[in-house]
C-alpha cells in the first residue's frame, strides 16, 4: 500500500504551518499519490450560476478573494490604509485571533464596520452596525461539499422554523444592497432572495447530464457503476420537478470519480502541478527561511520572549469538537450545554493530556489548571487521554 499524508487547519494555522503543508504537498506529488486509487483525490469543479456571472470576467465566485489573512494596522509601524467598509460574516476575530486588543484597534480604524452575527459577540460589540443574520435553522442556503470529499456534492439548507427574532438572511441583505447600487452589481438584482438563488442553482443541475438527487446506498453504487461505463441515467423530470426532488432529498451528488481526468488536479493553464507554487513563494518571502528551504518543515524551536523554552516546555495544539466544528454555532446555549458530548463537559473548556504528562506535572483528572504562554493564559479542566501525544496540551 502507498502511504498518504494529509493536512488540515490544525497544521496550516500554527506557526510554520504553511511550510509543513507545503512539505506534505510535495510528498504527495513526488510519491505519485495524487489522483490515484488509495491516494489524494481532487474534487472536480461543479459549475453553477453565480451572482457575479457576466460582471466579473475571469473571477468565479467560488474563487473570489472573500477573506483576508491580514488586518490594516495590525502589524508593525507601517500601517496600511484601512478599507472604507468591513463586513463580518460568520466571523468573530476579536475572540478567535490571539490578540483581541490588536483586532479592536484595527477595527477602530475602519470607517464602517458591519457585523452580521446573530449574537452580540465580541466583534459585534466593535461594529458600527449590527444586522443579525438568521440562524442556520431559519434560512435558505446551499452547501457545496468541502475539498476533502472526492466527488461533487451540493447540499440544500432549508428553513425548518420561522425566524424567532427580527432578523434577516445576510444573503438577502447583500442582494438588496446590490440592486440599489446598480452598475456592475446589477447582475445580482436578478435574484431578490437567497431562496431564488438556491432554486436557480438547483434548476441548473437538471441540465448537468450527470449525478442525481440524493438516493439510498444501493442506488449510489448503481449510479457509480453506470457512470464508470460512460453512461448516464436520465432523470426524466422537468427542471422544476427535478429541483423539487433535490430539495426533498436534501441535495445532489455525483459519486463517480474519473481517475483518467486530470483537469481538476491544477488550476494552471499549462496543466502542470507545482511542488512549490509561486503564490506560496510570495507568502514565504518575508520569513527567515530562504530559497529551497521554504517548502521544508519548520523545525526551528519557537521560544517565547520571556525566558524561552524552559518557561513553556509543553506544546499547545488546538482542535475542533464536533459541536462547534462549523464555526457558526459556538454561542448557542444548547451547544455550550452539550459541548463535550464524549466526556460530559459543559459550559466550560477542557484540555486533554497524556497520562504520562499529567503524572510528570502532578495533574489529576478533573483538576483545574492554568495554561500559560508568552501571549496570555486561560483556565480549564484537565482530562487525561491515552491517545494524546506526551508533552502536548490539546485544547478544544
Image: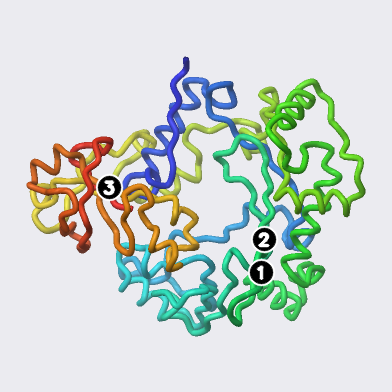
Return the residue at label 2: 141
Return the residue at label 1: 171
The spot of residue 258 in percent (x, y) is 70, 26
Tell me which numbered mark, 1 or 2, is placed earlier along the sequence: 2
| Identity of the residue drawn at 42% across and 32% down | 24
Tell me which numbered mark, 2 or 3, is placed earlier along the sequence: 2
Say what secondary structure mark 1 lies in. helix
Which sits in the foreground, 160 or 58?
A: 160
Marks 3 and 1, Cα distance to the nearest angstrom?
A: 36 Å
The spot of residue 122 in percent (x, y) is 39, 75
Marks 2 and 3, Cα distance to the nearest angstrom?
A: 34 Å
Q: Are marks 1 and 2 in contact (CB under 8 Å)?
A: yes
Disc ID at residue 394: 3
Label 2 crowd (10 A; few <14 / some 14-19 / many >=20) = many
Q: Is residue 349 left or right of residue 136?
A: left
Up the image or down, 66 lies above or below 110; here it is above
Amino acid at each position: 500500500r502507498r502511504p498518504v499524508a494529509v493536512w488540515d487547519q490544525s497544521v496550516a494555522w500554527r506557526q510554520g504551518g504553511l511550510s509543513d503543508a507545503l512539505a506534505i504537498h510535495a510528498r504527495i506529488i513526488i510519491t505519485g499519490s495524487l489522483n490515484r486509487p488509495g491516494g489524494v483525490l481532487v474534487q472536480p469543479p461543479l459549475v453553477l450560476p453565480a451572482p457575479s456571472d457576466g460582471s466579473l470576467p475571469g473571477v468565479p465566485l467560488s474563487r473570489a478573494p472573500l477573506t483576508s489573512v491580514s488586518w490594516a494596522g495590525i502589524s508593525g509601524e507601517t500601517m496600511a490604509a484601512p478599507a472604507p467598509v468591513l463586513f463580518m460574516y460568520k466571523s468573530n476575530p476579536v475572540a478567535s485571533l490571539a490578540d483581541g486588543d490588536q483586532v479592536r484597534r484595527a477595527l477602530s480604524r475602519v470607517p464602517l464596520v458591519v457585523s452580521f452575527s446573530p449574537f452580540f459577540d465580541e466583534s459585534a460589540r466593535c461594529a458600527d452596525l449590527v444586522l443579525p443574520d438568521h440562524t442556520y435553522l431559519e434560512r435558505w442556503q446551499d452547501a457545496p461539499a468541502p475539498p476533502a470529499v472526492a466527488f461533487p456534492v451540493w447540499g440544500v439548507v432549508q428553513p425548518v422554523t420561522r425566524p424567532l427574532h427580527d432578523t434577516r438572511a445576510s444573503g438577502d441583505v447583500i442582494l438588496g444592497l446590490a440592486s440599489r447600487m446598480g452598475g456592475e452589481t446589477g447582475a445580482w438584482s436578478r435574484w431578490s432572495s437567497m431562496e431564488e438563488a438556491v432554486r436557480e442553482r438547483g434548476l441548473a443541475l437538471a441540465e448537468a447530464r450527470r449525478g442525481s438527487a440524493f438516493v439510498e446506498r444501493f442506488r449510489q453504487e448503481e449510479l457509480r457503476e453506470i457512470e464508470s461505463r460512460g453512461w448516464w441515467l436520465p432523470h426524466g423530470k422537468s427542471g422544476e420537478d427535478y429541483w423539487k426532488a433535490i430539495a426533498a432529498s436534501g441535495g445532489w451528488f455525483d459519486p463517480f470519480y474519473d481517475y483518467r481526468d486530470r483537469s481538476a488536479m491544477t488550476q494552471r493553464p499549462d496543466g502542470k502541478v507545482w511542488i512549490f507554487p509561486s503564490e506560496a513563494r510570495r507568502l514565504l518571502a518575508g520569513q527567515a527561511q530562504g530559497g529551497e528551504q521554504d517548502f521544508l518543515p519548520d523545525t526551528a524551536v519557537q521560544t517565547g520572549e520571556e525566558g524561552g523554552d524552559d518557561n513553556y516546555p509543553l506544546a499547545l495544539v488546538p482542535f475542533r469538537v464536533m459541536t462547534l466544528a462549523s464555526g457558526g454555532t459556538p454561542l448557542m446555549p444548547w451547544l455550550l450545554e452539550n459541548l463535550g458530548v464524549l466526556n460530559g463537559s459543559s459550559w466550560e473548556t477542557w484540555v486533554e493530556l497524556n497520562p504520562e504528562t499529567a503524572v510528570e506535572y502532578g495533574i489529576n483528572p478533573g483538576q483545574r489548571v492554568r495554561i500559560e504562554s508568552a501571549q496570555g493564559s486561560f483556565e480549564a479542566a484537565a482530562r487525561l487521554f491515552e491517545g494524546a501525544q506526551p508533552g502536548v496540551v490539546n485544547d478544544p
